[in-house]
Amino acid sequence: RAKEDRNSYVMFSRAIYGNRKEIVQIETHLRHAINKNELFLMYQPKINAKTKKIVGVEALLRWNSEKLGFISPEKFIKVAEKSSIINDIGEFVIKESQKDILDVWRETNSKFELSVNVSPRQLSSIKEMNRFKKIILNSNFPNDKFIIEITENIFVGDVKRIILFLNTIKSYHISISLDDFGTGYSSLSILSKLPISELKIDKSFIHNMFLNEENMKLVKSIINIGKDINLKVVAEGLEEQKELDLLQSFGCDIYQGYYFSKPLSKEELISYIKTRH
Ligand code: C2E
Ligand code: CA
Ligand code: CA
Ligand code: CA
């Protein structure tokens, strides 16, 4: 019995994290990835539902390791989050994406928002919060065009302190977006506790809208709740015309997904904007 439990635990953790050896390898090489220029960013457009113009982009991290090849962010970020590596990566992502997007604005003569993903660990201690503030204060990217995406996972930390910090961020005119909405365990009351201005409906709901009527109703309800409390609602992972049509009828504000564009390199983003506008 005990042995069985242990085995199923091993299988479970392997499926999610890969095996022990792989984790150690990822950790070893990830330490040097920034200095070796192996990390880079891609940008996925966010499209306004009414005008179909770009309202922003989400920065998505990529790692092409010399030793290990291409590793998906879901995998290496989980490993990075177990150590302080995530804090160096987080700093890289903010600085690099802001620099890139300032270039793209200049090249395309346009201005739109930039969203970055922030891990709970980047907001978990006074030291890390101060590091985050310092990056922002030293940056010449306009705060009111900057959005950080958090997930309900931030509640693993000191909730009071995190809410205080998010309020500080908001006072800098940086916006906060709640990512992967609907996949966590928290209740709707999270929406009134956090100073957020945007909700991103997780792509699993969007994909399953036509498989399961409950999912369709959930998406519709999330959009209505978002509207009622003045949040922008983003549908993530939009791939098909029929999904777009349905979301339009629900009054969704913003779309992000392969239907409009996959994540693009900085150069690809520049030509995407030039041909679209
Ligand atoms: P996420 O923040 O939920 O990002 C959305 C993911 O959905 C991205 O996967 C994106 O490429 C993918 N996606 C977008 N549109 C579609 C679509 O139409 N269909 C499908 N099937 N997928 C779509 P990606 O780039 O592999 O990133 C995975 C996750 O890794 C992200 O999920 C985020 O949690 C994490 N991540 C990525 N970059 C960073 C980063 O710079 N910092 C942190 N902390 N996490 C990051
Ligand atoms: Ca995200
Ligand atoms: Ca998401
Ligand atoms: Ca996710």
Image: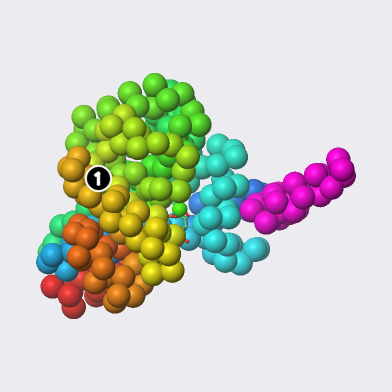
Whether 18 is among the magenta residues is yes
Horizontal arrangement in the rendering, residue 53 relative to residue 87 (left or right)? left
Point 20% across, 71% down: residue: 273
Which of the pair 165/135 is nearer the observer?
165
Residue 103 image offset from top left, x and y in percent: 24, 60
Point 18% across, 78% down: residue: 275
Point 70% across, 51% down: residue: 12
Under 8 Å from ligand 3: the CB of mark 1?
no
Which of the pair 34/261 is nearer the observer?
261
Horizontal arrangement in the rendering, residue 44 relative to residue 103 (left or right)? right
Residue 100 image offset from top left, x and y in percent: 30, 58
Residue 178 visible (yes or no)? yes
Point 23% across, 42% down: residue: 197
- Give the quarter of the image for residue 195: top left
Q: Which residues are magenta?
A: 1-24
**Residue corresponding to mark 1:** 225
Whether 5 is among the magenta residues is yes
